[in-house]
Image (cartoon, grey):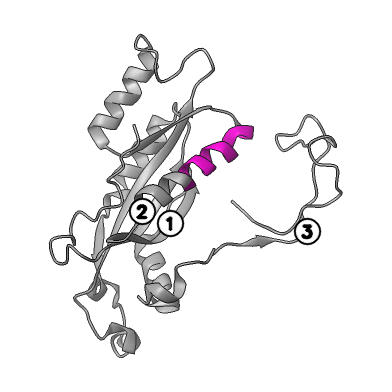
Amino acid sequence: INNSDACIPKYTRKKDKNNQKLFIMFLIHSHRNNYLRRKAMRDTWLSLRQIYLNDLIDDFEDQNNDLYFNKDINFEFSHLFIIGNENSSKNFNNENSREKSFIEIESETFNDLILIDTIESYKNLLYKHLAVVNWVVENCMKPKITTRYIIKLDDDVFVNIKQLTKHLYFKFGLNFALYNKFLYCNINYFARPIRKNSSKWFVDYETYPFDSYPRYCEG
């Protein structure tokens, strides 16, 4: 299950079939057992699928901003939950798996899951994320179907889509050509490996022998 058409706009594509741009694709890391978290997100902020520029105007100063020259612009959003396998003995090809059937029903109902064939564990999050990056390249970066922003987050996050859209639009506008190769994040400059083996973030010397990490994006 990979929902390869998730980056195709559902509301704006009829206007210009040769220039289909999704404004934000939310890629949400989730454990297969976290159905209630996914339901809470679907029932709240993920239920907003598009917003018009006019809806972002909330004071006189905004109304006189040059960026609001075209109030008919609309921003469309989509999302996918990224889910892994439970363990090595229960894989996605096991037709008798009750868990698989439950996930399949959820996918058929909401059409917003990507199943990654890797075991669900904290240390395997990297493999889930790399698989999703490949999915984005294959499905969201086509000549006539592009996504302006790919946002990675976890299933315990609430997003104010209106404020996020307003922030991105004010900061970067809609000139997609200028901002199609950048990473927007909080950078950690001084992180050190945790050597205490009881820690969730334990890293041994064999895996990483250095005293500090290079700078990296948090999250």
Q: Residues within 10 Å of mark 1 (few under 14, many from 20)?
A: some
Q: Residue at x 52, y 37 (%)?
A: 128
In contact (CB < 8 Å): disc 2 and disc 1: yes
Residue 135 position within the rendered picture, expressed as x and y whole percent measured from the top left: 42, 44
Which of the two labelled residues, at mark 3 and mark 1, occupies the earlier sequence position?
1
Location of the N terminus by quadrant is: top left
Frontmost residue, 101 versus 39: 101
Decide: is 136 above or below 63: above
> In the figure, residue 24 lies in which quadrant?
bottom left
Q: Which residue is mark 1?
A: 150
Q: Is residue 130 a member of the stretch shown in magenta?
A: yes
> In the figure, residue 49 lies in which quadrant?
bottom left
Q: Mark 3 against mark 1, which lies toward the viewer?
A: 1
Q: Residue at x 39, y 60 (%)?
A: 160
Q: Which residue is mark 2?
A: 140
Decide: is 82 above or below 140: above
Q: Which residue is mark 3?
A: 190
What separation in Å lies between label 2 and label 1 (alpha carbons)? 9 Å
Q: Amino acid at mark 2?
A: Cys
Residue 127 position within the rendered picture, expressed as x and y whole percent measured from the top left: 56, 37
Which region of the structure is painted magenta?
122-133
Q: Amino acid at mark 3?
A: Phe
Q: Residues within 10 Å of mark 3 (few under 14, many from 20)?
A: few
